[in-house]
Amino acid sequence: MLSELPRYEAYRVPYQSKMGVLSVLQYIQETLDSSLAFRGECKGGRCGTCGVMVNGKQALACLEPIKDGSTIEPLLGFPILKDLVVNRDYVDERIASIGDLALRRVDHRARVLSKPKLEQWHEVSKCINCLLCVSACPEALADWQRFAGASFFVRLSGADLDSRCRVQVAQKEGVYKCVPWFKCEKVCPAHIQIVAHAFHPLRAEIAKETDIWKRGIARRIRYYFEIPDYTSWFSQRVFKISLKLLGALHCRGRRIVRIKAGEPVFGRYEGGRNDGRNND
Ligand code: SF4
Ligand code: FES
C-alpha cells in the first residue's frame, strides 16, 4: 500500500540553546504531530533505547545535539515498526539466550578474577545495549544470521559462564567474522574498546580451550560429555595411558615397516630370508 511506504516529514521547531534530538522529537509529538513514534526512556544515555540515525550517523537521541536542517531516521539495519521505532528482537533474543547458558554451568565454585580480567569485565559492563554498534557494522548488516554483532559479543565476554559454553556460543555466533573495521567503537556512546575487550579475549579463550595437545585428550572427553572438573585426576590418568598406548603402537608400526623394507632387525628375523647376506 502506498501509505505504508517510508517517507520523510518536515517539521519546523523553535530552537533553544543546548537542545537535543530527543527534546525535538518530544516537542513534535506534543505540539505538531501526536502520532509520531519514537523510543526514549531515561533521557540520560543509560537505557539504550533511543538509538536513531542523525544526518546519516548512528547516535543516541538523548545525547545528540540538534543542528539546523538535521535529518532523523530510524536505526539502520533493523526492520521498522513505526516511524523511528525499530524491531530489535533478533539481537535482544540472542542476548537473552546468554542468561539461559548461565544455568548450564557445571563448575559453581567461587573464582578470583585476575586484574586484566577484572579490567576487561569493568569495560564491557558499561554496555547499555543501545545497538548502535550493530547498526554501524558492515559485517552485521551484510549477514546478521551468521554474525550476531558487537553488542552480543560484548555481553558474552562479560557473562559469568563456563569457558567451554562461552567458546561454543562465540564460535556459533561468528566471532571470527569481525574484520575489524572499528566502526562499532566510533559510535559506541559508552566508549568501550569493543575489539580489545570483547573480540580479542573471546578469541584467546577459544585458542586456549581448543588447544588439544596442551590441555589433553581427557579434557576433550570431559568437554563433550560435560563431566565436571573433579574428574581431573582420572582424566590425567586416562591421558597418560592413552599416550603410552599410542607410543607402543608407534613402535610396532616402525618394526613392520623395517621388515617390509628388507632391513635386518633384532630378534627372530636376524639372519633370516630378509637378511641380504643369505641371498648369495
Ligand atoms: S557496545 Fe557500545 S554501541 Fe554496542 S550496544 Fe554496548 S554501549 Fe551500545
Ligand atoms: S533515552 Fe535512555 S539512552 Fe537515550
Image (spheres, helix red, strand yellow):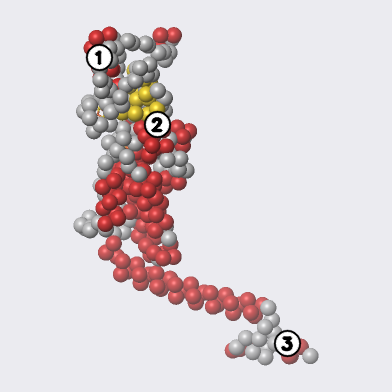
Answer with left or right where residue 173 lies relative to residue 252: left
Q: Nearer the viewer, residue 116 or 247?
A: 116
Find residue 11 and report its horizontal and vertical position in percent: 33, 11
Answer with left or right where residue 77 lies relative to residue 120: right
Find residue 268 and report its horizontal and vertical position in percent: 61, 89
Q: Amino acid at mark 3?
A: Gly
Identify whether 42 is placed above or below 151. above
Q: Amino acid at mark 1?
A: Tyr
Q: Residue at x 66, y 86 (%)?
A: 264
Find residue 104 and report its horizontal and vertical position in percent: 28, 49
Q: Residues within 10 Å of mark 1 (few under 14, many from 20)?
A: some
Secondary structure found at label 3: helix
Name the front one of labels 1 and 3. Answer: 1
Q: Which residue is mark 2?
A: 135
**How much space separates mark 1 and mark 3, taking CA atoms?**
102 Å
Name the disc covering residue 27, or none: 1
